[in-house]
């Protein structure tokens, strides 16, 4: 059960200002969130398989080796380049 004191403590820890008139509605909303999380936590998962709930198989195409583009064509629009690679600015 989430109480007004819990909401006030969370607000204090997160350095958020919560108006007194909003405490009741925030308490109700937080209680709904916690109840939903409890519902998810209490679901029985040992009876079913969840890895293929849509009954899909081999939905990805097979990898195929193909021809690469020439390095010159790949680098032709690069703003900065050296030899056969892109140059990027160092971030601080």
Image (cartoon, rainbow, N blue to C red):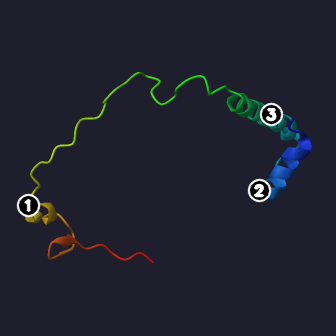
**67 and 77: which is toward the camera:** 67
Q: Which residue is found at the position 31% from the left and 30% from the top? A: 59
**48 and 56: which is toward the camera:** 48
Q: Which residue is found at the position 80% from the left and 33% from the top? A: 31
* Mark 2 crowd level (few <14, some 14–19, many ≥20, 10 Å Cα): few
Label 1 – label 3 distance at C-alpha: 60 Å
Reading the chain from its start, which is encountered first: label 1 or label 3? Answer: 3
Q: Secondary structure at mark 2?
A: loop
Percent position (x, y) of residue 76? 12, 64
Q: Which residue is found at the position 19% from the left and 66% from the top? A: 78
| Label 1 sits on residue | 70
Q: Secondary structure at mark 3?
A: helix
- Please count the marks in the image: 3
Q: Which mark is residue 78?
A: none
> Mark 2 against mark 3, which lies toward the viewer?
3
Q: Which mark is residue 31?
A: 3
Horizontal side of residue 17 vs 58, given as left or right: right
* Quadrant position of residue 68: bottom left
Q: Give the answer, above or below, for where 90 lies relative to 67.
A: below
Percent position (x, y) of residue 60? 29, 34
Which quarter of the rendered picture does the C terminus lie within?
A: bottom left
* Quadrant position of residue 63: top left
Horizontal side of residue 36 vs 77, given as left or right: right
Q: Which residue is found at the position 70% from the left and 33% from the top? A: 41
Is residue 19 something that shows in the picture?
Answer: no
Horizontal side of residue 72 vs 87, given as left or right: left
Percent position (x, y) of residue 8? 87, 48
Q: Give the answer, above or below, for where 34 lies relative to 12.
A: above
| Label 2 sits on residue | 14
């Amino acid at each position: 059960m989430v109480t007004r004191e819990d909401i006030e403590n969370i607000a204090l820890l997160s350095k958020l200002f919560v108006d007194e008139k909003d405490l009741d509605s925030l308490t109700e909303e937080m209680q709904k969130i916690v109840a939903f999380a409890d519902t998810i936590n209490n679901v029985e998962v040992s009876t079913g398989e969840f890895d293929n709930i849509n009954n899909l198989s081999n939905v990805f195409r097979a990898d195929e080796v193909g021809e690469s583009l020439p390095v010159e064509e790949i680098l032709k629009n690069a703003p900065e380049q050296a030899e056969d690679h892109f140059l990027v600015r160092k971030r601080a």
